[in-house]
Amino acid sequence: MFLNTDQYVSASKALVESQFAAVNALTDIAVQGTEKVVILFMAIGKASAKDTMAAANNLLAEKHPQAFVSLATACAKPNTE
C-alpha cells in the first residue's frame, strides 16, 4: 500500500492535522454557544433581580396593612404559576 515510510508519515501527519482542525472548529462552536448561553442567563438574572427589587420597593412603600397583603399576594401569583 505505502511504498516507503515517508508516504506513511505524510499520510499520518495529514490525518492528524485534519483531526486537530476538526476538533478546533468544534471547540470554537461549543465555546461560542456557551458564551451565548451565559449571556442569556445573565440577562435573565438581571431582569429577575430588577423585578424583585421593584416589587420589594413597592411593598416597602405601602403604608396600610391591607394594601401590603394584597400587593404581596399579587406579586407572589406570577411566581407560583
Image (tube, grey):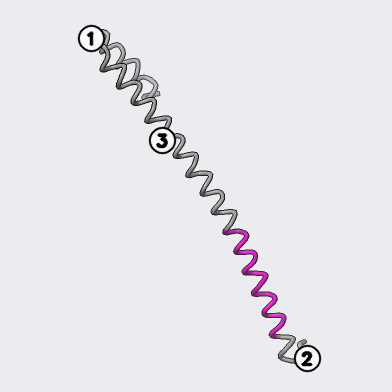
Residue 45 image label: 3
Residue 63 image label: 1
Q: Helix, strand, or loop for circle 1?
A: loop
The residue sitting at 45% across, 34% down in the picture is: 44
Q: Helix, strand, or loop for circle 3?
A: helix
Q: What quarter of the picture does the C terminus occupy?
A: top left
Which x, y percent locates residue 38?
A: 47, 44
Q: Helix, strand, or loop for circle 2?
A: loop
The residue stretch that appears in magenta: 9-27
The residue sitting at 60% across, 58% down in the picture is: 26
Instruction: Work out whether 46 lies above or below 65.
Output: below
Instruction: Work out whether 22 lies above or below 80.
Output: below
Q: Quadrant of residue 30?
A: bottom right
Q: Marks 1 and 3, how far apart in space?
A: 30 Å
Q: Mark 3: which amino acid?
A: Gly
Which x, y percent locates residue 15?
A: 68, 75
Residue 3 image label: 2
Q: Mark 1: which amino acid?
A: Lys
The residue sitting at 31% across, 16% down in the picture is: 58
Say which of 72 and 45 sits in front.
45
- Does 78 sit left or right of 66 as displayed? right
Q: Residues within 10 Å of mark 2 (few under 14, many from 20)?
A: few
